[in-house]
């Protein structure tokens, strides 16, 4: 069975754990410990083939120091998450993206995710703006709600499909 190693990155509070746990366990966990970094496995079907997704839900801010760099070198693909209600979390992903591109090159499988799409009243970021930006970088963009389970499985599956297409797994 093919195994896809996916790393979930983004600022604290954007919903990395909520997305991961919604996908893996099918529940919304509103108060998950922000300091926990753990990996999860989920069986799935990718392009009609049984597959195992190994997902690393990261925590902390020093994303490119020490141990983490090892994960980034061995990961097959990345999911970059920001919160639609906090523009700075989108801005901060630029550095994350540059670091990944530096270590892994520009065609590393990567998905951009704006989470908390259910919070309509406090939204700070325009969908069209991010879509245009993502298109110029050739990065697929999704808006999700971990809370309402909208587009959640899609981001993990699309990441795996991208990995498969770019020859990241055998
Ligand atoms: P992490 O630090 O990136 O792992 O973020 P968490 O998954 O711990 O989520 C941070 C906070 O945002 C928690 O209070 C969650 O309940 C909340 N949250 C996460 N995803 C969503 C979402 O899709 N919608 C809403 N309304 N809240 C969310
Ligand atoms: Mg977390």
Image (cartoon, helix red, strand yellow):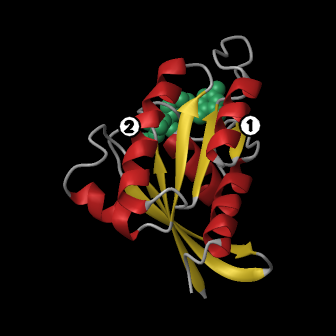
Seen at 26% across and 41% down, the residue is: 62
Q: Which residue is mark 2?
A: 34
Whether label 2 touches label 1, CB < 8 Å: no
What is the CA distance from the residue labelled 2 to the residue labelled 1?
A: 20 Å
Q: Quadrant of residue 113?
A: top right
Assess mark 2: CB under 8 A from ligand 1? yes
Above or below residue 45? Residue 85 is above
The percent coordinates of residue 36 (x first, y second) are 35, 47
Element marked by disc 2: loop
Q: Residues within 10 Å of mark 2 (few under 14, many from 20)?
A: some
> Is residue 65 something one can see in this rendering?
yes
Seen at 74% across and 26% down, the residue is: 127
- As drawn, the label of residue 148 is 1
Q: Looking at this view, is 105 or 36 the one in front?
A: 105
Above or below residue 14? Residue 160 is below
Report ligand 1 position as a quadrant: top right
The mark total stands at 2
């Amino acid at each position: 069975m093919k195994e896809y190693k996916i790393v979930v990155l983004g600022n604290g509070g954007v919903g990395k754990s909520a997305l991961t746990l919604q996908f893996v366990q099918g529940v919304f966990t509103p108060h998950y410990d922000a300091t926990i970094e753990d990996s999860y496995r989920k069986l799935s079907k990718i392009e009609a083939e049984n597959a195992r997704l190994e997902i690393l839900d990261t925590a902390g801010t020093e994303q490119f120091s020490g141990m983490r760099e090892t994960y980034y070198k061995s990961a097959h693909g990345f999911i970059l998450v920001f919160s639609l209600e906090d523009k700075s979390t989108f801005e901060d992903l630029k550095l994350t993206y540059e670091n990944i591109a530096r270590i892994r090159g520009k065609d590393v499988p990567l998905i951009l995710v704006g989470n908390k799409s259910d919070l309509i009243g406090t939204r700070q970021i325009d969908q069209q703006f991010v879509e245009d930006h993502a298109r110029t970088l050739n990065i697929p963009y999704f808006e999700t709600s971990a809370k309402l389970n909208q587009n959640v499985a899609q981001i993990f599956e699309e990441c795996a499909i991208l990995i498969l297409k770019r020859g990241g797994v055998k």
